[in-house]
Image: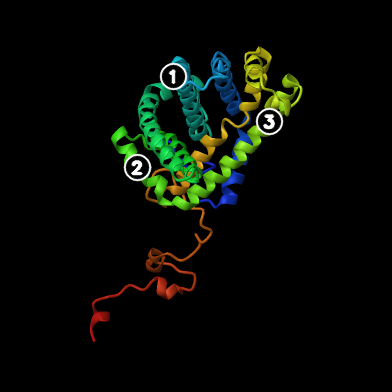
Amino acid sequence: MENLNNHPLAGKHDIDSAFSGIWSFYKQWFVPLYAISFIMALIASYISSGIDLGSIQNTMDINEIMAFMKSIFGIMAIQLVISLFFNLLLQYFIIYKPLKEDFNIMEAIGTVFVKFFFPILLISILLGVFAFFALMLGALLLFVGIFFAIPYIMLFYTLLSPLMIIEKTSITETVPRLFKLVHRKFWPNMGWISIFLVLLVFFTFIVNAIITLPFSGSMISSFTDPDSVTGTMKMASNPIFIIVSSLASALTGPLLPILGLVLYFNNSNDNTEFGTKSNNKNDDKVKVEDLYSKNTDNSTDDEDNFSPTVDDLKP
C-alpha cells in the first residue's frame, strides 16, 4: 500500500500554502491532467450540442417547458455520468500517480470503473436530492441563502471522491464520514471553496468570452441580440467551436479534484487518519519519550554508565 504521507499535497495547509501547492502540482502534471480533462470536455460538449434551446426560446408555457426538460433528461443524465467517471479518473490519477512509478492509465480506468464508479454514483444521486432541498431552502431565504448553499454542496462533492478512493469505505461508512469531514473545519472549508469557485467562474467567463468572440463577432451582441439563443446553438454545434471550447474547458477541469485532495488532507486528524502528515516546524521540540532516553547532550560518561544496585537503595 502506498504511503500517502509522501504525497506532495499531504499535510496541513493554510490558504496560501494550499493554493501554491495546487498550482505547483498542476504545473508538474499538466500534460496528463490536461489530456484527461480535454477528452471529458470534448465528449460533454458534443453531447450538449444536440440540445436545442431555441425550441423554448419564446415560450412561457410551463407544459412546453416541462416537456422539453423531459426530452433532454436522458442526454443530461448521460453527460453527467460521463463527467462523473472522468472526474473520478482525474482524482485517482492525482492521488496515486505521484506515488506509483509503474502507474498505468488503463489499469487506473479499470480500477475506477469496477471499484469506485457505481458506489460514488449512488452517493452522488443522494447528494443531488440533498442539494435540491438545500438550494430550495436557500431560494426561500430571499436568494441570499443560495450563496451559502452552493459552496456548502460543493464541499460534499469535492471531498467525496478522495475520501472513498483513499479510505476505501463502503457506502454506509462513507456518508457519515463525509459529513464529519465537511463540518470538521467548516468555516475555513467554506472560505476556501468559495474563493476557489469565484476565481474559477471568473476565469471561465474570460476564457469563454475570448473563445466566443471569433464566432459571434461581438461579445455584446451575443447578449443584446434577440436571436442570441438561436445563434449560440448554431455556434455550439460547430465542430470547430466544440474543439476550441473543449481545449479551453480542459484548463480548469483538474483544479477541483486537486483542491478536493488538499481539503481531504487538511481535514484529517494528525497522525490518526490514513494519508495525513504534519507540516509542523516544531518537530525538533523535546518529546516525553526523549526525557527517558539513555543518552542526552549534557550527560557525562559516568552518568551514562551508572547502574543502580541493591546497596544504592539502602538508606
| Circle 3: residue type | Val
Q: Earlier in the sequence, mark 1 or mark 3?
A: 1
- Disc 2 element: helix
Counting residues from the start of the chain, the first of labels 2 and 1 encountered is 1
* Disc 2 residue type (three-letter): Arg
* Residue placed under numbered mark 1 in the picture: 63
| Residue picked out by circle 3 | 207
**Disc 2/disc 1 C-alpha distance (Å):** 41 Å
Query: The C terminus appears in which quarter of the rendering?
Result: bottom left
Nearest the eye: 298 or 86: 86
Residue 5 visible in the displayed image: no
Instruction: Kindly check if marks 1 and 3 are in contact, taking CB atoms under 8 A apart as contact.
Output: no
Residue closer to the observer: 35 or 177 = 177
Instruction: Say which quarter of the image contains residue 132.
Output: top left
Secondary structure state at the residue bearing disc 1: helix
Figure check: 81 above or below 309: above
User: Does residue 221 lie above or below 202 as drawn?
Assistant: above
- Residue designated by label 2: 177
